[in-house]
Image (cartoon, rainbow, N blue to C red):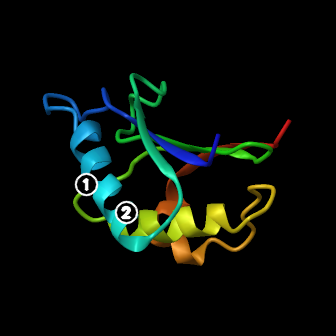
Amino acid sequence: MKDRVVICDTCSAEGAAPLGAAWADQLSAAVAESGLDIDVKMASCLNMCDTPLSFALQGPQKATYLFAGADPETDTQDMLGLLSLYLNAPDGWITEAHAAGRLRLCLQGRVPKL
C-alpha cells in the first residue's frame, strides 16, 4: 500500500452540488503530470460536513491528517505542495507546512502513526 489522499465525494456547501469527485479527477491528472507517487481516492463522508470540502492524508506507518475547507478551484497547486511534503516525511509528521499554501490553514486534525 502506498500513501494516499482521500477526498470526500459527498461534501458540499448548502444547496450546492458535491465537488469532491470532480476534484479527485482533476487532482489525479495533476498528480500524474507532476510525477508524485500517491494514490487519489474518494470516500463518502469524512464527517466534516460543516466545512466542505474535506480530505485526508494516509500512509503506511505515517501520521494521518484530516483537512476541511478546501476549494478545488484554487487549491490544486497547494495540494501538490502538501502531497510532496507528506511523501517526503518518513513518518508523515510535517513540521514546516508553508509549501502547502492555504491548505495548511485547513488542517483539522493529525493522528500519530500506529
Secondary structure beneath disc 1? Answer: helix
Res. 26 mark: 1
Q: Which residue is mark 2?
A: 32
Camera-side residue of 84 and 102 = 84
Quadrant of the snapshot with the C terminus:
top right
Kindly identify the residue that appears in the image at 24 percent across and 35 percent down.
Answer: 13
Rendered view: 99 above or below 106 = below
Rendered view: 27 above or below 52 = below
Residue 49, image quadrant: top left
Kindly identify the residue that appears in the image at 20 percent across and 29 percent down.
Answer: 14
75 relative to 19 in the view: left or right = right
Kind of residue sitting beneath label 1: Gln
Kindly identify the residue that appears in the image at 39 percent across and 38 percent down.
Answer: 51
Counting from the top left corner in percent of width and height, residue 88 is at 69, 68
Res. 76 mark: none
Kind of residue sitting beneath label 2: Ala
Counting from the top left corner in percent of width and height, residue 27 is at 33, 55
7 relative to 71 in the view: left or right = right
Kindly identify the residue that appears in the image at 13 percent across and 28 percent down.
Answer: 15
